[in-house]
Image (cartoon, rainbow, N blue to C red):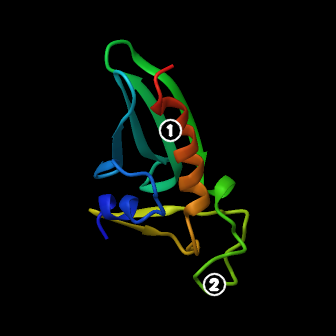
């Protein structure tokens, strides 16, 4: 699947996230937007999401990282590999224009998306 399709396929319930490649944008209250990006350690390996809250006038207001291993249950996987251990965690791997889970495939990404959505809700209302 394309990188944008991979990101959209995560278990989002919050409406209004627009994806282009590895970046999602969502309008928030006042003059703020949320920028959601996959986080890489290089060589096309992605290990989580980083969310930035941006004020259009003044720049980044806040930033938080959500690593896959912290929010996805490694014991609940849809792959049947027994040789891949928890030490390595969950990764998404880029192959040209496509993106897929690397070996360990989580059954559900709802806990990750829920954590990001809870973070975004804090900034949805005018402070």
Classify mark 2: helix, strand or loop.
loop
Provide residue 63's location: percent of width, then percent of height.
Answer: 53, 30
Q: Which percent across, then down, holds residue 113?
A: 53, 54
Viewer can see residue 76:
yes
- Which residue sits at x=34%, y=46%? 23
Which residue in the structure is indicated by mark 1? 120
Dot 2, crowdedness within 10 Å: few (<14), some or many (≥20)? few
- The dot on residue 97 is none
Residue 56 placement (x, y as % from top left): 32, 20
- Residue pictured at 72% horizontal, 67% vertical: 86
Of the image marks 2 and 1, the number of the one nearer the N terminus: 2
Q: CA distance from mark 2 to mark 1?
A: 34 Å
Q: Callout 1: few (<14), some (14-19), or many (20+) C-alpha neighbours within 10 Å?
A: some
Between 2 and 122, the residue placed more toward the observer is 122
Return the x and y of residue 26 as percentages of the image width and height: 35, 40
Give the number of the mark in front: 2 or 1: 1
In the image, 115: left or right of 19? right
Residue 96 in view here: no
The dot on residue 81 is 2
Q: Quadrant of the N terminus?
A: bottom left
Which element carries disc 1, helix, strand or loop? Answer: helix
Of the pair 104 and 121, the residue shown nearer to us: 121
The residue under the point 59% across, 63% down is 90
Residue at the extreme top of the image, as rendered:
58
Q: Residue 31, relative to residue 75: is it above or below?
A: above
């Amino acid at each position: 699947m394309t990188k944008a399709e991979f990101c959209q396929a995560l278990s989002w319930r919050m409406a209004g996230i627009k994806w282009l490649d590895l970046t999602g944008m969502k309008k928030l209250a006042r003059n703020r937007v949320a920028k959601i990006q996959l986080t890489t350690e290089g060589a096309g390996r992605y290990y989580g999401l980083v969310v930035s809250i941006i004020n259009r006038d003044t720049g980044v207001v806040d930033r938080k990282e959500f690593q896959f291993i912290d929010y996805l249950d490694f014991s609940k996987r849809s792959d049947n590999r027994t040789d891949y251990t928890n030490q390595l965690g969950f990764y998404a791997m880029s192959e040209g224009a496509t993106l897929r889970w690397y070996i360990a495939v989580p059954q559900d990404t709802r806990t990750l998306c829920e954590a990001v959505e809870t973070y975004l809700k804090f900034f949805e209302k005018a402070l």
